[in-house]
Image: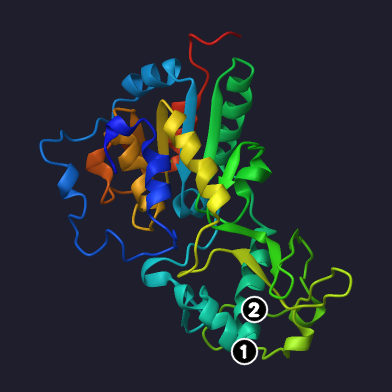
C-alpha cells in the first residue's frame, strides 16, 4: 500500500492504518528503523544554493514541524532526560488514564503549560514560514504547515494554512457533551490560579473535581479536558485526511525541528521522499529518517529556515 505508483501515497497511508494513535513505539524498536528504505542512499546534501533552486520551482510546499522549532522560543519540550514536570515524566501525564485517575494533577500540568506560553513568542523560523506563506500566496503558490506542536506559535506568527495533528493547548473539550471551544482564560479557572509550579518539591494542588474547568454550554457543566491528542488516543480523522491531501499534492517538503520518532508523523516525510519529492530536514541533529531525505541542515531552525524560505531572485517584487 506504500507504492509510489498509487498516486495518493500519504492518503493511502492514512486510510489503511486505523485508528491512527499517537504512539512512540512504532518504528522505534531499533536505531536503524529506516534501513529498509535506505539501502544505496547517498548522504543528504547541505547545499543551500541547491535547495533554493528547488524552492524557486515549488508550487505546493508542506512544512512539517515538531517540538524543536518551539524549543527555540524557550518552550519546554518535556522530551529526553529533562522531560519531567515535578517528579512526573511528562508523557505519563499526557494519557486519558492519567486524567481519569487524577484530573486535578493533569489540569495543573496543562495549566502550567498554558501560562508558560503567555510569555513566549514566535521565533525567526515561525515568522519566516508565515511570511513565506503570505508572499507565495500572491504568486498563486501554496504553503501549508502540518505541526505536531500544540502551542499555537505558528498561528501567532501569522500562519493561516495549518493542520494541528495533536490539537491545541488553547482549546478545551467537554467530557460530557463533547463540545470543543477556544479558551485563552488565564487562569483557566480560579482554583488553578498560582498552581502548576514545576519544581520537584511542589505539592500537588488536589483541586476537587467540581472546582476544575467546567463546560459553559447551557445545561451541561461537564468536566473539561485539554483538546489535545494524548498518547494512546486516535488522531482526528478529518485533520489526517486534510493533511494527507496536502502531502499528496506537495512538490517540496520541509521537516523542521522534529525527532522523526513520534508515530504517525514520523512516516510522513519519508513517504513523501519515496515518490521523488525533494525533502529538506532542518534539525539540531540527525534523526532516524535523515538518510531518507535529499537535504539536511544541521543547526538552529531560526538560522536556516529564514535563509531557506527568503524571497528568491526569480520571484516578482
- Provide the secondary structure element on which disc 1 rests: loop
Q: Is residue 170 left or right of residue 265?
A: right
Disc 2 designates what residue?
A: 108
Q: CA distance from mark 2 to mark 1?
A: 8 Å
Residues marked 2 and 1 touching at CB (< 8 Å): yes
Give coordinates of residue 141: x percent, y percent. 55, 20
User: Does residue 286 appear to the left or right of 114 in the view shown?
Assistant: left
Bin the neighbour count of mark 2 within 10 Å (Cα to Cα): few under 14, some 14-19, many 20 and up. Answer: many
Q: Position of residue 300 (x, y in %)?
A: 42, 43
- Residue 295 is at least partly visible in this image: no
Picture residue at 49% right of the left edge, 63% below the top: 234
Residue at disc 2, secondary structure: helix
Q: Which mark is residue 204?
A: 1
Residue 86 versus residue 179 in the image, above or below? below
On-image quarter of the N terminus:
top left
Does label 2 or label 1 sit earlier along the sequence?
Answer: 2
Q: Residues within 10 Å of mark 1 (few under 14, many from 20)?
A: few
Vertical relation: 232 (above or below) 296: below
Task: Please indicate whether residue 207 sits to the left or right of residue 309 in the image.
Answer: right
Amino acid at each position: 500500500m506504500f507504492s509510489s505508483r498509487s498516486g495518493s501515497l500519504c492518503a493511502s497511508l492514512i486510510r489503511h492504518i486505523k485508528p491512527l494513535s499517537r504512539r512512540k513505539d512504532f518504528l522505534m524498536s531499533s536505531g536503524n528503523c529506516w534501513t529498509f528504505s535506505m539501502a544505496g542512499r547517498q548522504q543528504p546534501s547541505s547545499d543551500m544554493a541547491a535547495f533554493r533552486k528547488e524552492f524557486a520551482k515549488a508550487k505546493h510546499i508542506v512544512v512539517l514541524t515538531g517540538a524543536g522549532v518551539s524549543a527555540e522560543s524557550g518552550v519546554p519540550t518535556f522530551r529526553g532526560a529533562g522531560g519531567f514536570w515535578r517528579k512526573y515524566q511528562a508523557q505519563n501525564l499526557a494519557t486519558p488514564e492519567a486524567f481519569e485517575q487524577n484530573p486535578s494533577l493533569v489540569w495543573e500540568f496543562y495549566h502550567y503549560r498554558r501560562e508558560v506560553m503567555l510569555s513566549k513568542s514566535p521565533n525567526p523560523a515561525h515568522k519566516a514560514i508565515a511570511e513565506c506563506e503570505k508572499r507565495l500566496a500572491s504568486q498563486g503558490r501554496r504553503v501549508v504547515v502540518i505541526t505536531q506542536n500544540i502551542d499555537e506559535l505558528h498561528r501567532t506568527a501569522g500562519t493561516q494554512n495549518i493542520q494541528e495533528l495533536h490539537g491545541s493547548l488553547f482549546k478545551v473539550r467537554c467530557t460530557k457533551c463533547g463540545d470543543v471551544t477556544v479558551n485563552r482564560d488565564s487562569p483557566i479557572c480560579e482554583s488553578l490560579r498560582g498552581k502548576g509550579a514545576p519544581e520537584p518539591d511542589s505539592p500537588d494542588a488536589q483541586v476537587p473535581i467540581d472546582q476544575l474547568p467546567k463546560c459553559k454550554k447551557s445545561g451541561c457543566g461537564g468536566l473539561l479536558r485539554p483538546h489535545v491528542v494524548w498518547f494512546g488516543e486516535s488522531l482526528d480523522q478529518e485533520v489526517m485526511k486534510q493533511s494527507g491531501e496536502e502531502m499528496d499534492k506537495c512538490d517540496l517538503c520541509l521537516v523542521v525541528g522534529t525527532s522523526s520518532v513520534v508515530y504517525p508523523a514520523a512516516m510522513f516525510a519519508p513517504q513523501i521522499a519515496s515518490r521523488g519529492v525533494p525533502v529538506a530536514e532542518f534539525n539540531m541533529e540527525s534523526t532516524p529518517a535523515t538518510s531518507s531525505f535529499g537535504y539536511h541542515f544541521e543547526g538552529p531552525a531560526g538560522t536556516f529556515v529564514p535563509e531557506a524560505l527568503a524571497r528568491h531572485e526569480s520571484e516578482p517584487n
